[in-house]
């Protein structure tokens, strides 16, 4: 219930900032509950979530934000200066300005074909490439893994990988929630 209220607060906040279906929200917030709540809220509103690796340089961050067409970048206080420098055309908000209570998100949301997540490749053969996953992709992955692993309410996952990575964001964070379990989010590996 507390998590649902937290995500609901983020949904209301994103909506108040004009973020909705087709929008794009980026995060430079590391392994934090704010980053996860922002991802879930983006998915509920129909926006695409783009997690940035805090260890990447400013040039890569600027490229990803331009390439993804980010409307909003949420950064922790530690990265606020970098965020405002790499994203002059993007609305930048620090996590200290995020809401902490709210109403449950709506029961209905965008269609399953809506882009939900854009993860960037390492770019070893050129510029990084944004790989877009839809809500249907995320839910199909979670459903298949839930069935295969048999996770339930007693499942607790220790998330040590960085959540800008698809394994930590989907398998270690979204899958436990989908299965009725929980995750313990470590702030660093």
Image (cartoon, grey):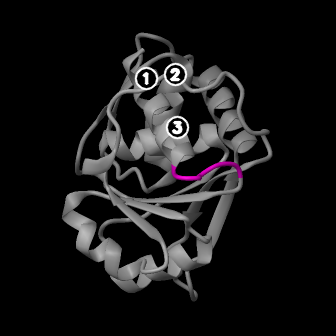
Q: Which residue is mark 1?
A: 5
Magenta stretch bounds: 17-21
> How far is disc 3 from disc 1 in space, using C-alphas?
10 Å
Spot occupied by residue 144 in the image (x, y as percentages of width and height): 68, 29
Left or right position of 71 against 107: left
The residue that appears at 71% across and 56% down in the rendered structure is: 22
Q: Provide the residue designation for mark 3.
A: 11
Q: In terms of sequence position, does the residue under pointer 3 or pointer 1 come before the other?
A: 1
Q: Residue furthest left?
A: 78
**Residue 180, image x, y percentages:** 50, 16
In the rendered image, the vertical position of residue 20 relative to residue 149, given as above or below: below
Residue at image coords 35%, 53%:
162
Marks 1 and 2 in Cβ contact (< 8 Å): yes
Residue at which label 2 appears: 104
Can see residue 110? yes
Q: Main secondary structure of the magenta part?
A: loop
Q: Is residue 49 magenta?
A: no
Whichever of callouts 2 and 3 sits on the residue coming sooner in the sequence is: 3
Figure quadrant of residue 112 = top right
Number of numbered markers:
3
Q: Is residue 56 visible?
A: no
Query: Does residue 86 appear to the left or right of 137 in the view shown?
Result: left
Reading the chain from its start, which is encountered first: label 1 or label 2? 1
Q: Residue at x 48, y 23 (%)?
A: 103
| Label 2 residue SS | loop
Q: Are marks 2 and 3 in contact (CB under 8 Å)?
A: no
């Amino acid at each position: 219930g507390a998590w649902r209220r937290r995500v609901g607060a983020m949904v209301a906040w994103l909506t108040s900032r004009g973020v909705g279906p087709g929008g794009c929200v980026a995060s430079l917030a590391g392994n934090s509950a704010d980053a996860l709540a922002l991802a879930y809220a983006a998915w509920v509103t129909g926006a695409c979530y783009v997690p940035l690796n805090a260890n990447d340089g400013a040039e890569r961050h600027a490229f990803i934000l331009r390439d993804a067409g980010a409307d909003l970048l949420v950064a922790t206080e530690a990265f606020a200066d970098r965020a405002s420098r790499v994203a002059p055309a993007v609305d930048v908000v620090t996590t200290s300005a995020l809401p902490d209570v709210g109403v449950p998100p709506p029961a209905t949301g965008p269609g399953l074909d809506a882009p939900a997540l854009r993860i960037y490749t390492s770019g070893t053969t050129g510029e990084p490439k944004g790989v877009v996953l839809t809500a249907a992709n995320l839910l199909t992955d979670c459903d298949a893994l839930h069935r295969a692993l048999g996770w339930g309410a007693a499942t607790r996952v220790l998330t040590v990988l960085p959540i800008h990575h698809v394994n930590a964001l989907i398998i270690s964070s979204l899958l436990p929630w989908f299965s009725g379990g929980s995750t313990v989010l470590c702030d660093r590996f």
